[in-house]
Protein backbone atom coordinates (compact mmCIF):
# COMPACT_ATOMS: atom_id res chain seq x y z
CA UNK A 1 0.00 0.00 0.00
CA UNK A 2 1.45 3.40 -0.88
CA UNK A 3 1.64 5.95 1.85
CA UNK A 4 -1.27 8.34 1.96
CA UNK A 5 0.18 11.67 2.93
CA UNK A 6 -1.87 12.65 6.00
CA UNK A 7 -2.91 16.15 6.88
CA UNK A 8 -0.63 16.06 9.91
CA UNK A 9 2.55 15.89 7.84
CA UNK A 10 4.57 18.40 5.91
CA UNK A 11 7.31 17.95 3.37
CA UNK A 12 10.68 18.16 5.07
CA UNK A 13 13.47 20.32 3.75
CA UNK A 14 16.57 18.66 2.33
CA UNK A 15 18.65 16.95 4.94
CA UNK A 16 17.90 15.14 8.20
CA UNK A 17 14.84 15.71 10.33
CA UNK A 18 16.95 16.45 13.42
CA UNK A 19 17.64 20.19 13.41
CA UNK A 20 20.85 19.75 15.42
CA UNK A 21 21.94 16.79 13.31
CA UNK A 22 24.77 18.67 11.56
CA UNK A 23 26.81 18.43 14.77
CA UNK A 24 26.47 14.65 14.96
CA UNK A 25 27.66 11.63 13.03
CA UNK A 26 24.69 9.94 11.34
CA UNK A 27 23.70 6.54 12.68
CA UNK A 28 22.76 5.62 9.09
CA UNK A 29 24.26 7.22 6.00
CA UNK A 30 23.57 5.87 2.51
CA UNK A 31 25.44 7.32 -0.48
CA UNK A 32 24.09 6.43 -3.92
CA UNK A 33 23.14 2.90 -2.91
CA UNK A 34 22.07 0.50 -5.64
CA UNK A 35 21.03 -3.13 -5.22
CA UNK A 36 20.65 -5.39 -8.22
CA UNK A 37 19.69 -9.05 -8.13
CA UNK A 38 20.67 -11.28 -11.05
CA UNK A 39 17.92 -13.78 -11.76
CA UNK A 40 19.28 -15.68 -14.71
CA UNK A 41 18.79 -13.49 -17.76
CA UNK A 42 16.82 -10.94 -15.77
CA UNK A 43 18.23 -8.21 -13.54
CA UNK A 44 16.00 -6.82 -10.80
CA UNK A 45 16.91 -3.32 -9.65
CA UNK A 46 15.66 -3.26 -6.07
CA UNK A 47 17.34 0.04 -5.12
CA UNK A 48 18.30 2.78 -7.55
CA UNK A 49 20.75 5.33 -6.15
CA UNK A 50 19.33 5.86 -2.66
CA UNK A 51 20.97 8.51 -0.51
CA UNK A 52 19.66 9.32 2.95
CA UNK A 53 20.73 9.91 6.53
CA UNK A 54 19.24 8.98 9.88
CA UNK A 55 20.72 10.70 12.92
CA UNK A 56 21.04 9.54 16.53
CA UNK A 57 17.72 9.81 18.35
CA UNK A 58 15.53 9.86 15.25
CA UNK A 59 12.41 7.70 14.89
CA UNK A 60 11.80 6.96 11.21
CA UNK A 61 9.00 5.04 9.51
CA UNK A 62 9.85 3.45 6.14
CA UNK A 63 6.86 2.99 3.84
CA UNK A 64 6.10 1.83 0.33
CA UNK A 65 4.17 -0.72 -1.70
CA UNK A 66 5.32 -4.31 -2.11
CA UNK A 67 8.36 -4.29 -4.38
CA UNK A 68 9.19 -0.66 -3.65
CA UNK A 69 12.60 -1.47 -2.20
CA UNK A 70 11.91 -0.90 1.49
CA UNK A 71 12.75 -4.48 2.53
CA UNK A 72 15.97 -4.41 0.52
CA UNK A 73 16.83 -1.12 2.19
CA UNK A 74 16.28 -2.64 5.64
CA UNK A 75 18.43 -5.65 4.76
CA UNK A 76 21.30 -3.36 3.82
CA UNK A 77 20.80 -1.05 6.82
CA UNK A 78 20.67 -4.13 9.07
CA UNK A 79 23.93 -5.48 7.58
CA UNK A 80 22.09 -8.57 6.30
CA UNK A 81 23.07 -7.68 2.72
CA UNK A 82 25.52 -5.43 0.90
CA UNK A 83 24.88 -2.81 -1.80
CA UNK A 84 25.80 -3.63 -5.39
CA UNK A 85 27.00 -0.07 -5.75
CA UNK A 86 27.34 2.89 -3.39
CA UNK A 87 28.36 3.12 0.24
CA UNK A 88 26.69 2.55 3.60
CA UNK A 89 28.07 4.04 6.81
CA UNK A 90 26.86 2.81 10.22
CA UNK A 91 27.87 5.09 13.09
CA UNK A 92 30.46 6.61 10.77
CA UNK A 93 32.02 3.28 9.71
CA UNK A 94 31.88 2.22 6.06
CA UNK A 95 30.36 -1.27 6.19
CA UNK A 96 29.60 -1.55 2.45
CA UNK A 97 32.33 -4.07 1.64
CA UNK A 98 32.77 -5.96 4.90
CA UNK A 99 32.88 -9.75 4.89
CA UNK A 100 29.96 -11.85 6.12
CA UNK A 101 31.74 -12.49 9.44
CA UNK A 102 32.48 -8.79 9.89
CA UNK A 103 28.85 -7.92 9.14
CA UNK A 104 27.68 -10.53 11.65
CA UNK A 105 29.87 -8.95 14.31
CA UNK A 106 28.49 -5.48 13.53
CA UNK A 107 24.93 -6.83 13.75
CA UNK A 108 25.49 -8.37 17.17
CA UNK A 109 27.12 -5.23 18.56
CA UNK A 110 25.15 -2.35 17.08
CA UNK A 111 21.75 -3.46 15.76
CA UNK A 112 18.63 -4.87 17.40
CA UNK A 113 16.01 -6.56 15.20
CA UNK A 114 12.24 -6.91 15.74
CA UNK A 115 10.11 -8.80 13.22
CA UNK A 116 6.41 -9.23 12.43
CA UNK A 117 6.73 -12.91 13.35
CA UNK A 118 8.04 -12.90 16.90
CA UNK A 119 10.58 -15.67 16.17
CA UNK A 120 10.71 -16.90 19.77
CA UNK A 121 11.87 -20.41 20.63
CA UNK A 122 8.71 -22.23 21.73
CA UNK A 123 10.29 -24.44 24.39
CA UNK A 124 12.41 -21.68 25.88
CA UNK A 125 11.36 -19.23 28.59
CA UNK A 126 11.06 -15.52 27.97
CA UNK A 127 14.27 -14.93 29.93
CA UNK A 128 16.18 -17.53 27.93
CA UNK A 129 14.84 -16.16 24.63
CA UNK A 130 16.10 -12.70 25.58
CA UNK A 131 19.50 -14.13 26.59
CA UNK A 132 20.20 -15.70 23.18
CA UNK A 133 21.95 -12.72 21.52
CA UNK A 134 24.33 -12.41 24.47
CA UNK A 135 25.44 -16.01 23.91
CA UNK A 136 26.19 -15.39 20.23
CA UNK A 137 28.08 -12.18 21.02
CA UNK A 138 30.26 -13.80 23.68
CA UNK A 139 28.92 -12.03 26.77
CA UNK A 140 30.25 -13.72 29.96
CA UNK A 141 27.82 -16.19 31.54
CA UNK A 142 27.47 -14.19 34.77
CA UNK A 143 26.42 -11.11 32.75
CA UNK A 144 23.87 -12.77 30.46
CA UNK A 145 20.98 -13.27 32.88
CA UNK A 146 21.50 -9.82 34.40
CA UNK A 147 21.20 -8.17 30.99
CA UNK A 148 18.20 -10.28 30.03
CA UNK A 149 16.31 -9.39 33.20
CA UNK A 150 17.08 -5.70 32.72
CA UNK A 151 15.75 -5.89 29.15
CA UNK A 152 12.50 -7.50 30.32
CA UNK A 153 12.10 -4.70 32.86
CA UNK A 154 12.50 -2.14 30.05
CA UNK A 155 9.49 -3.61 28.21
CA UNK A 156 7.36 -4.17 31.32
CA UNK A 157 7.64 -7.97 31.48
CA UNK A 158 9.75 -8.53 34.59
CA UNK A 159 7.00 -10.78 36.02
CA UNK A 160 6.85 -12.98 32.91
CA UNK A 161 10.49 -14.07 32.72
CA UNK A 162 9.71 -17.74 33.39
CA UNK A 163 6.78 -18.00 30.98
CA UNK A 164 6.99 -19.83 27.66
CA UNK A 165 5.74 -18.15 24.45
CA UNK A 166 2.57 -20.30 24.47
CA UNK A 167 1.72 -18.76 27.86
CA UNK A 168 2.01 -15.20 26.55
CA UNK A 169 -0.32 -13.05 24.45
CA UNK A 170 0.75 -11.76 21.06
CA UNK A 171 1.62 -8.37 22.55
CA UNK A 172 3.65 -9.98 25.33
CA UNK A 173 5.53 -12.12 22.82
CA UNK A 174 6.40 -9.01 20.82
CA UNK A 175 7.61 -7.36 24.04
CA UNK A 176 9.90 -10.33 24.63
CA UNK A 177 11.17 -9.93 21.06
CA UNK A 178 11.86 -6.25 21.72
CA UNK A 179 13.67 -7.11 24.95
CA UNK A 180 15.78 -9.59 23.00
CA UNK A 181 16.62 -6.85 20.48
CA UNK A 182 17.74 -4.55 23.30
CA UNK A 183 19.84 -6.99 25.32
CA UNK A 184 23.16 -6.12 23.64
CA UNK A 185 22.52 -2.36 23.99
CA UNK A 186 22.38 -1.55 20.25
CA UNK A 187 22.68 1.95 18.83
CA UNK A 188 19.98 1.17 16.26
CA UNK A 189 16.66 -0.68 16.55
CA UNK A 190 15.16 -1.99 13.28
CA UNK A 191 11.57 -3.23 13.30
CA UNK A 192 9.94 -4.88 10.27
CA UNK A 193 6.12 -4.62 10.46
CA UNK A 194 6.26 -4.95 14.27
CA UNK A 195 2.49 -4.49 14.67
CA UNK A 196 1.44 -6.61 11.68
CA UNK A 197 0.19 -9.53 13.79
CA UNK A 198 -1.37 -7.47 16.58
CA UNK A 199 -4.78 -5.95 17.29
CA UNK A 200 -5.24 -2.18 17.40
CA UNK A 201 -4.76 -1.60 21.12
CA UNK A 202 -1.74 -3.90 21.38
CA UNK A 203 -0.21 -2.16 18.35
CA UNK A 204 -0.42 1.17 20.17
CA UNK A 205 1.13 -0.43 23.28
CA UNK A 206 4.08 -1.57 21.17
CA UNK A 207 4.43 1.92 19.67
CA UNK A 208 4.42 3.29 23.22
CA UNK A 209 7.44 1.11 24.01
CA UNK A 210 9.25 2.34 20.91
CA UNK A 211 8.45 5.96 21.71
CA UNK A 212 9.68 5.61 25.29
CA UNK A 213 12.90 3.92 24.18
CA UNK A 214 13.41 6.68 21.65
CA UNK A 215 12.59 9.57 23.99
CA UNK A 216 13.93 8.41 27.34
CA UNK A 217 16.97 6.43 26.21
CA UNK A 218 17.78 8.17 22.93
CA UNK A 219 17.61 4.95 20.92
CA UNK A 220 17.48 5.42 17.16
CA UNK A 221 14.43 3.57 15.82
CA UNK A 222 13.59 2.67 12.21
CA UNK A 223 10.40 0.73 11.46
CA UNK A 224 8.95 -0.65 8.23
CA UNK A 225 5.17 -0.37 8.12
CA UNK A 226 2.46 -0.30 5.46
CA UNK A 227 0.02 1.34 7.89
CA UNK A 228 -0.13 5.17 7.70
CA UNK A 229 -1.63 5.38 11.20
CA UNK A 230 1.35 3.50 12.65
CA UNK A 231 3.73 5.80 10.78
CA UNK A 232 2.09 8.73 12.62
CA UNK A 233 3.86 7.60 15.81
CA UNK A 234 7.28 8.19 14.22
CA UNK A 235 9.03 11.54 13.97
CA UNK A 236 9.75 11.21 10.27
CA UNK A 237 8.46 9.08 7.40
CA UNK A 238 10.19 8.13 4.17
CA UNK A 239 8.40 6.51 1.24
CA UNK A 240 9.98 4.29 -1.40
CA UNK A 241 8.67 3.65 -4.88
CA UNK A 242 10.34 1.59 -7.63
CA UNK A 243 13.60 1.44 -5.70
CA UNK A 244 13.84 5.19 -5.19
CA UNK A 245 13.28 7.46 -2.22
CA UNK A 246 10.23 9.49 -3.24
CA UNK A 247 9.17 11.28 -0.06
CA UNK A 248 10.88 12.36 3.12
CA UNK A 249 8.43 14.06 5.47
CA UNK A 250 8.45 15.25 9.04
CA UNK A 251 5.49 14.16 11.17
CA UNK A 252 3.77 17.23 12.56
CA UNK A 253 1.52 16.80 15.62
CA UNK A 254 2.64 13.18 15.80
CA UNK A 255 0.54 10.71 17.74
CA UNK A 256 1.74 9.99 21.26
CA UNK A 257 0.90 6.43 22.21
CA UNK A 258 0.64 7.18 25.93
CA UNK A 259 -2.10 9.71 25.13
CA UNK A 260 -3.92 7.48 22.64
CA UNK A 261 -4.08 4.38 24.86
CA UNK A 262 -6.59 5.81 27.40
CA UNK A 263 -9.01 6.48 24.52
CA UNK A 264 -9.02 2.84 23.35
CA UNK A 265 -11.14 0.00 24.75
CA UNK A 266 -9.36 -2.23 27.22
CA UNK A 267 -8.63 -5.84 26.33
CA UNK A 268 -11.49 -6.93 28.60
CA UNK A 269 -13.94 -4.60 26.84
CA UNK A 270 -12.84 -5.98 23.46
CA UNK A 271 -13.44 -9.51 24.76
CA UNK A 272 -16.96 -8.69 26.00
CA UNK A 273 -17.81 -7.03 22.66
CA UNK A 274 -16.45 -10.05 20.79
CA UNK A 275 -18.53 -12.50 22.82
CA UNK A 276 -21.64 -10.35 22.36
CA UNK A 277 -21.12 -10.38 18.60
CA UNK A 278 -20.46 -14.11 18.49
CA UNK A 279 -16.67 -13.86 18.17
CA UNK A 280 -15.30 -15.89 21.09
CA UNK A 281 -11.62 -15.54 20.27
CA UNK A 282 -9.96 -14.06 23.40
CA UNK A 283 -7.13 -12.48 21.45
CA UNK A 284 -7.70 -10.54 18.22
CA UNK A 285 -3.95 -10.82 17.69
CA UNK A 286 -4.55 -14.43 16.82
CA UNK A 287 -2.48 -16.61 19.15
CA UNK A 288 -5.23 -17.66 21.52
CA UNK A 289 -3.77 -16.20 24.70
CA UNK A 290 -5.56 -13.40 26.52
CA UNK A 291 -3.87 -10.02 26.93
Image (tube, grey):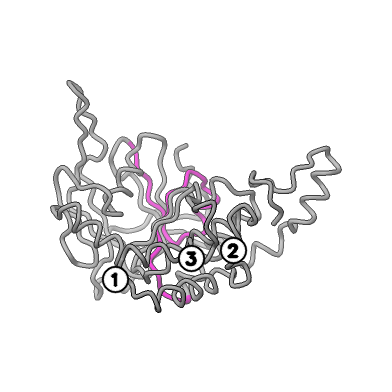
Mark in the foreground, 2 or 1:
2
For label 1, the crowd category at 10 Å Cα-Cα, with few meaning under 14, some 14 to 19 and many 20 or more, is some
Residue pointed to by mark 1: 21
Q: Is residue 60 left or right of residue 169?
A: left
Measured in 3D between alpha carbons, the distance from the residue under mark 2 to the one under mark 3, in whole angstroms, is 19 Å
**Residue 149 position within the rendered picture, expressed as x and y whole percent measured from the top left:** 51, 74
Instruction: State which tag comes first along the sequence, 2 or 3.
Output: 3
Depth check: give the residue in front, 115 or 236: 115
**Which quarter of the picture shows residue 173?**
bottom right
Mark in the foreground, 2 or 3:
3
Q: Is residue 228 magenta?
A: yes
Depth check: give the residue in front, 217 or 141: 141
Mark in the foreground, 3 or 1:
3
- Using the image, determine if residue 125 lies above or below residue 48: below
**Which quarter of the picture shows residue 47?**
top left
Q: Tell how many labels.
A: 3
Q: Is residue 72 left or right of residue 221?
A: left
Depth check: give the residue in front, 154 or 257: 154
Instruction: State which tag comes first along the sequence, 2 or 1.
Output: 1
Query: What residue is shown at x 78% (from left), y 50% (from top)?
Result: 271
Disc 1 on helix, strand or loop?
helix
**Residue 206 position within the rendered picture, expressed as x and y whole percent measured from the top left:** 56, 60
Residue pointed to by mark 3: 179
Measured in 3D between alpha carbons, the distance from the residue under mark 3 to the one under mark 1, in whole angstroms, is 28 Å
Instruction: State which tag comes first along the sequence, 3 or 1.
Output: 1
Disc 2 on helix, strand or loop?
helix
- Which portion, as a residue range, is magenta? 216-241
**Residue 198 position within the rendered picture, expressed as x and y whole percent measured from the top left:** 60, 49
Query: What residue is shown at x 19% (from left), y 30% (from top)?
Result: 38
Residue pointed to by mark 2: 257
Disc 3 on helix, strand or loop?
helix
For label 3, the crowd category at 10 Å Cα-Cα, with few meaning under 14, some 14 to 19 and many 20 or more, is many
Amino acid sequence: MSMNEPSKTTQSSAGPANTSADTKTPTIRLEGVHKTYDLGEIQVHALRGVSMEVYPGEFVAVMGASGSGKSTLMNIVGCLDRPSKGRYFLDGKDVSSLTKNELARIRSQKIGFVFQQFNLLARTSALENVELPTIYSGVPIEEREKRARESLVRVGLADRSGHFPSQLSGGQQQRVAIARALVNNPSLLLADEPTGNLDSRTSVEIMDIFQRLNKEQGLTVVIVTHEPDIAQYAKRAVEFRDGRLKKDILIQDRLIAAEVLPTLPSADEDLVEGIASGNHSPNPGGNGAPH
